[in-house]
Amino acid sequence: MPKPLVSIIIPTYNRADIISNAVCSALQQTYSNKEIIVVDDGSTDNTCERLRVFGDNIRLVRQVNAGPSAARNAGVKASMGQILTFLDSDDLWLHSKIAKQVKMLQSVDESVPCCLCNALILRNSGKKVTSFDLAPIRARIEKGLWLNVTSILSTRCVLFTQAAAVRRSVFEKVGGFDESLRIMEDHDMALRLSLEGPWAFLREPLVIYHYGIEDGLAEEARHNDLQICKSIERIVANMLADRRVPETGAKKYFARSHTKMWRHIERSQGWSKARRISVLMDKSFEAVMQVCDFAFRHSPMYPKMEVTAFGGQNR
């Protein structure tokens, strides 16, 4: 039997109530040459029992609780595909998501490490917004190559893990997800991948992200303020030390955001104000934008998305 080209990795922790929805979303992809691996990160509920109904349509990996990064890495280790995709247990994909991303990656050089699509964010209030608009990253074309990924991701966040299709070779080259991070591990991975070359992108929303549903894998970590701030510090320090990070704009922003974070903590009473930083991690993109300095975002230093159509001109 031929190896699947695409591996879909679904990490989960105590999500018996909704895990079936994510698995069905993966099974219903129109792209057929795929495998689905669910990694149970030490659930104490009946998550694994709920997965039995899928039989041989999925592979189940079980491990002691180690956090989202370790769960995703375990899924990659158990997988065979040359293109890696990740779906959280509380999110969904449109049926054509993988097919469109595979087509994009097959139409570009292998130096392009991944393909990122847009995502539709659904709020509890019923309001809808896309992750590209919320970041904001404004592509002037529907699809193509994103040229200045590091500069953009140094100044804002965009939904990454659920929306990316990553070449296995590059994922392994950058060392996988940082297992010391239980918060913001997705943005850390995006930043490291951004240093490997331009990304393919699709402006079309192919992910449905449910804002406001607690993710069991990161829920505990989000309430640990010291862990949150240490995660930020680690990511910032790594990027400042990397010679490939653009000196203008990106490094200056990393340095000033690091200083502002610790000044904010020093001024806080205990950790009560610092707790507001917790929403910056993982899933709250509005909070990320609030942390960004308004004046910087309106200065000439604030980078705009640079894209090119395949075989076309920069825009």
Image: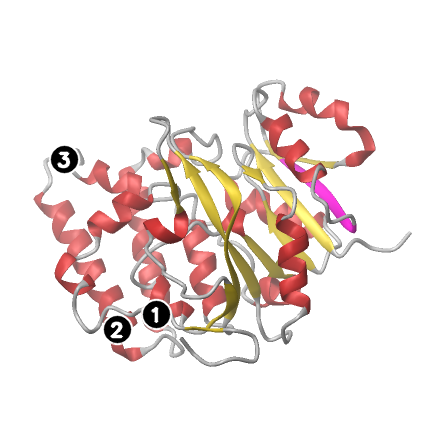
Q: Quadrant of residue 188?
A: bottom left
* Image disc number at residue 151: 1
Q: Amino acid at mark 2?
A: Gly
Q: Answer with mark 1 or mark 2, whichever residue precedes in sequence.
A: 1
* Residue 67 rendering spot, x and y as whole percentages: 50, 39
**Span shown in magenta:** 33-39
Say whether residue 110 is visible.
yes
Q: Amino acid at mark 3?
A: Gly
Camera-side residue of 43 and 59: 59
* Residue 297 rendering spot, x and y as whole percentages: 20, 62
* Residue at numbered disc 2: 249
* Residue 164 rendering spot, x and y as whole percentages: 55, 54
* Residue 157 rendering spot, x and y as whole percentages: 36, 54
Q: Quadrant of residue 256?
A: bottom left
Q: Is residue 131 left or right of residue 236?
A: right
Which residue is situated farthest in the right direction here?
1
Camera-side residue of 226 and 177: 177
Kindly check if marks 1 and 2 are in contact, taking CB atoms under 8 A apart as contact. Answer: yes
The CA distance from mark 3 to mark 1 is 34 Å
The CA distance from mark 3 to mark 2 is 33 Å
Q: Residue at x 29, y 39 (%)?
A: 278
